[in-house]
Image (cartoon, rainbow, N blue to C red):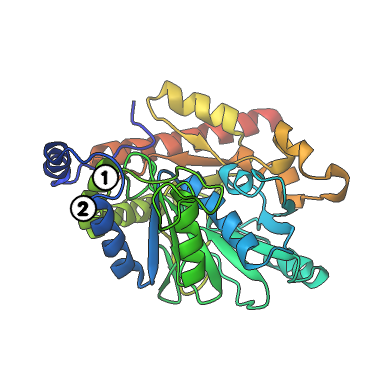
Amino acid sequence: MIPIYQIYQAPNTRKYVDKVLKSNWLTTGGYFNIAAEEKLKEILKCKYVLLTNNGTTASHLLSKVIKNKNNKINKIICQDNVYVAAWNAFLFDGNMGLEIIDIDNKTWNYDREKLEKKLSENSSDTTAVLIVHNIGNPFIIKNEKFTIVEDNCEGFLGSYNNIKTGTAKNCLASSISFFANKNITSGEGGAVITNDESSYLYAKNLHAQGQSETRFIHNNLGYNYRMTNLNAAILLSQIEVMDNILQKKKEIVEFYKRELKEIEEISFQEVDNNCEHSNWLFGVRIKNSTYKIANRFFQLNGIETRPMFYSAMEQPYMQNYINQKKVILDISNQKINDEIVFFPSYPSLKKTELKTVVRMIKQYIKNLKEISLLKTT
């Protein structure tokens, strides 16, 4: 089986992990925590980086930072068809509602016109905006009126106008995930990125149990959202070979596109001008296909796949948080996730494996054509 993803083995991982074990400092606040944060600040050209234990907790801290900046904000605009953690992080505290906006049929990000219309209908005093760089495709709005945060868990190391995702001037703060299937991983982990000092200090306080400068005196109800020194050691070893990982990912995506571009039934996720996709995952939309049928075909041929994220309207638990009668999601109602399939694209994917995947995609398309032809005769 060719897996959907495998972790890239960085040369210094074992060395750094061994150093942590020998130091007996496995918990938070160690050398590698500090070194990884400093390296990320350098790469992202931002003022503050706060490592967390995963991307979801980093995103939850975004919701806390928003309320700390403006306690009157009680709603956040979100796009549809994203991983549920992007929504959940703003629902945990029960003090913020979601306004779900449809996605664009080509970019799989916000429908820009619908977003702008929704912004015109809302007040910046009570409404914030969450941007998700879906599947790693950068999305940017120039609006400086609304409080904007970015779920950059998939878009990390992508860019728009040569600015790294999650670091735009009008972005209050952003979250990153270093989960095992991300381009850069610590196994499990995340980070909050910001250029705003008060937001950084507040998030830092909350992520460490709300402890004040006096040990065991806590001035906020906080959480244990800290990354361990052990995870940070793995993270630093990955960051060191970041350019190599990104180059390999780019070459894989370019190969897929080059080999599949002439197939009429296939369309790719479109990237806006002046944007650089993070190439987190590679997926295609297959006309007149369904994921259930596609997945069965590829599984039988030894290839692991993933579907597109489902609409909020198809999540049973989300019906407790959104008013179904007031939400009309055109593209989602077409079940875009049914036609999108994600294929293996990890950095160490062998050329022979890549060719096998492409060959089976072409075979699947051929099968679809034959079935369609039978139906019309």
Residue 159: give x, y in percent of width and height: 43, 68
Q: Which residue is mark 1?
A: 229
Seen at 51% across and 77% down, the residue is 169
Q: What is the CA distance from the residue labelled 1 to the residue labelled 2?
A: 7 Å
Label 2 crowd bin: few (<14), some (14–19), many (20+), radius 10 Å? some
Instruction: Quadrant for residue 9, please give it.
Output: top left
Residue that badge 2 annotates: 31
Asked whether residue 107 is in view, the answer is: no
Q: Assess whether mark 2 and mark 1 are in contact (beta carbons under 8 angstroms).
A: yes
Image point 35% across, 32% down: which residue?
A: 3
The residue positioned 60% from the left and 42% from the top of the image is 84
Identify the secondary structure beneath mark 2.
helix
For this rendering, which residue is in front, 134 or 252? 134
Residue 310 picture location, percent across and down: 64, 40
- For residue 241, what is the image quadrant? bottom left
Q: Is any part of residue 14 visible from this angle?
A: yes
x and y percentages locating residue 44 in the rendered image: 36, 68
Q: What's the residue type where badge 1 is placed?
A: Asn
Q: Which quadrant of the rendered structure holds the N terminus?
A: top left
Residue type beneath disc 2: Tyr
Q: Quadrant of the C terminus?
A: top right
Say which label, 1 or 2, has the lower sequence index.
2
